Image: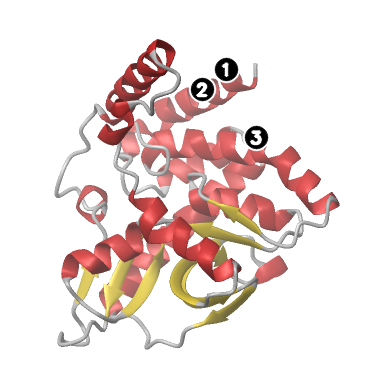
Amino acid sequence: GDETLGPEGLAAALRTWDGQRAWADRLAAAGTPIVVTTTNPLGISTSRFAASGLDVIGVCELPVQTRLATGAEAGAYTGLNHRGFWHHLAGRPDDDYVPDKYFSVLTGATTPRPGRADHVNDIRDEALAQASADPSRYPPALAGRDLPWHRLALVPVLAAIAGRPQPLVLTLPLHGDADPVCDERQVILNGADVTPVGQPPPPADVQRWYDRFLAHERAVLAAAAAPGTPTVARALELDPLVPDAAVASLTIDVLASYERWRC
C-alpha cells in the first residue's frame, strides 16, 4: 500500500482529514503563524489545515529529487503531490517534460509492487529492539530508511522560515478560501512570506494530465470531507490507478477500512 496514491491513498486521505481536524482547530485557536505539514496525502493534509483558516505549507522532496535526477539546473514545475512534471528545462525543447517517478505507475507502464510497508515495519522492529538493548546508542537499523525529505525539503523550509530565503516547490491552497484544493508551485519562501515564481504555461500533454489529476484531487477532497458511498466511489472512478470494474468493491473496502480506524 501507499499512503498517497491509489485506493490505499484514498483510505489514508479519509483518516488524515478526520484525524487532523482537531489539531488544525487547536492551532488556529492558538494563533499559530504558520503550519508546516509533511503528512501524506499531502494535498489533503494541507487543505485540512487551510480549512481551519491557518497559513499552511505542504512539504515534499519529490519535485526537487526529480529535478536533480534529470541533471537540469532550472525549469518550470506543474503538478500535485506525487503527480508532477518539470518542463521548460534548460537546454531542452519547450514541449519536452520530465515526470516524477510515479508517472509510469499512473499510466500503467509499470505495476505497483507490494513490500514497501513491510520494509518500513522491519526497520522499525529492528530499531526498537536495538534501542531496548542499548538505549544510549542510536539504533543502527534507522540507517536503512532513506529520508531524503529532510535534506531536500524540510531543512530548506526551516531555513527559509528562520530568515534565509529559499527557492522551493511547496504544496499550497490553489485559490484560498474559494477553492480548498492544493497543488504544488515554485515559490520563494522568506519567513512566512510566500512569493510565487513566474513560469511559462506547461506543454499541452502536461496540462491534460494536470487537469485529470486535479479532477481526481477534488474528488478525493470531497470524499475526505464527507465520507460516503457516492463520494468515495467518485474518487475511485477518477483515479487512473483503479479499473472501472473494481470501483464498487473498492468503495466498500475503503469505507470499511475507515470505519475500523474510527473505532
Mark nearer the N terminus (1 vs 3):
3
Quadrant containing the C terminus in the rendered view: top right
Are discs 1 and 2 less than 8 Å apart at CB?
yes
Give, as a three-letter code, the residue at label 3. Gly
Quadrant of the rendered image containing residue 72? bottom left
- Residue 168 in the image: state x and y as whole percent: 44, 71
Q: Residue at x 56, y 81 (%)?
A: 195
Question: Residue 114: which quarter of the image?
Answer: top left
Label 3 secondary element: helix
Task: Write down the residue under mark 3.
Answer: 19
Going by the numbered disc 2, the residue's amino acid type is Ser
Q: Secondary structure at mark 2?
A: helix
Q: Nearer the viewer, mark 2 or mark 3?
A: 3
Asked if residue 105 shows in the view, the reply is yes
| Label 3 packing within 10 angstroms: few (<14), some (14-19), many (20+) | some
> Could you say where residue 43 lies in the image, as x and y percent from the top left?
52, 54
Residue located beneath label 1 in the image:
260
Dot 2 and dot 3 residues touching (CB under 8 Å): no
Q: Which residue is mark 2?
A: 257
Badge 1 density bin: few <14, some 14–19, many ≥20, Cα 10 Å: few
Residue 224 image label: none
Q: Is 104 rendered above or below residue 256? A: below
For residue 248, above or below residue 230: above
Foreground residue among 137 and 123: 137
Left or right relative to 29: residue 27 = left
Which quadrant, please, contains the N terminus? Answer: top left
Residue type, numbered disc 1: Arg
Mark 1 vs mark 2, CA separation in Å? 5 Å
Local crowd size for mark 2, using a 10 Å CA cut-off: few (<14), some (14–19), many (≥20): some
